[in-house]
Amino acid sequence: MKKRQRRVQRMWVMGGILLLPVALGFIPGVPHPFLNLFLWWVPPPPRVEVPAPLPGVERVLVIAPHPDDELLALGGTIAHLTGEGHQVLVVFVTNGDANQAAKQVFTLNPLRRAEDYRALGCRRQKEAVAALRILGVPKTAAVFLGYPDQGLTALGSENWERGNPYPSPYTQANYPFYRNSFSLTAMYCGEDLVADLATILHLFSPTVIYLPHPEDGHPDHRAAAQFTLIALLRGEVEGDPELRLYLVHAPSWPAPRRLAMDLTLTVPTALDPWEWRSHELTEELVGLKLRAIQAYSSQRITSGRFLASFVRQNEVYAVSAASDLPGGPALSR
């Protein structure tokens, strides 16, 4: 009888220990502890100034709508570039702080709490710099703009002007509130996002720009591509950088949806008319990409098979001039 009582007591104690973090996550203003459980020892990335352009090497600018896009589409390419001594700068337009699936899995809380989404954004930043470090990119070459996840399309239309900023339904903010955001005076509006991108283009003077494909299936990706084009066509960058358009979201792509390191990526049939190129990866680069993907723990738990499906023998991108892209010559913002 006493053994049974002690067993029941231990079960209650263990249940209380397990439920305490969940209960804390329901307190207003307190971010859920599970969101930072695995990265509590990693400091937040610093606010980064645009590095001075280095002469005699390729200066590669990567525009990533969300943390992990740069890795899925270009992880092996980035590792190859840094290994060859080229200068790589990664710009994250949003912090991926509106991922409802990841938020619910880590918090077990169905409520839409702003503090949880903000904590998720901080976690995504930490994951990003950890992944980039594996690829040879220092944290001083990772710029976080801090614009609203799932809200970039609105910034190009009804929330273009500073006087009418976009209110994120997830973080309950209308400005880049993260302390390491590139512009500390920006608002969630198209004007300020283009201004940030134009400043980065002017100061970094890239020779190559990787940006989302304008026909990517995710609206944030299409919007990020358009904002980059607007900044480019304003003439804020010297020279004529080569544009390389990468793809992340397309119907039933990549296939199969699993880790298949022995296979190659092919281009979706609907996008065949574009001029595509393939960058073949060495076994070492494929291994580095897989290791870097493992750093995105918040994404692996909800989209692990999708992320793993990008670890292939190659990476693909399309090439184009800014004036030839959809809407390019007509951009008048």
Image: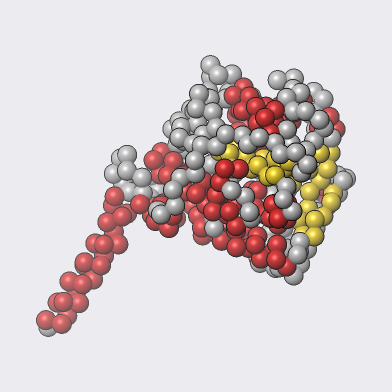
Colour mode of the rendering: secondary structure
Q: Nearer the viewer, residue 102 or 291?
A: 291
Residue placed most toward the observer, 209 or 203: 203
* Picture quadrant of residue 233: top right
In this view, 195 is above or below 88: above
Outermost residue toward the front in this view: 55
Picture residue at 33% right of the left edge, 48% below the top: 25
Residue 209 point in image, percent of width and height: 74, 39
Q: Residue furthest top?
A: 163
Q: Quadrant of residue 203?
A: top right
Image x and y of residue 283, in percent: 73, 67
173 left or right of 263? left
Q: Quadrant of the N terminus?
A: bottom left
| The C terminus - image quarter | top right
Residue 59 vertical position relative to residue 262 in the rendered view, above or below? above
Label tally: 0
Q: Is residue 291 above or below residue 320?
A: below
Residue under the point 21% across and 72% down: 10
Q: Observer-nearest residue: 118 or 128?
A: 128
Quarter-of-image position of residue 291: bottom right
Would residue 207 be seen by someone viewing this image from the given angle? yes
Residue sitting at x 87%, y 46%: 275
Residue 265 screen position, x and y as percent: 77, 59
| Residue 77 visible at all | no
Left or right: 57 in relation to 89: right
**Could you say which is closer to the camera, residue 327 or residue 245?**
245
Would you say 99 lies left or right of 311 here?
left
Residue 7, percent from left and from top: 20, 77
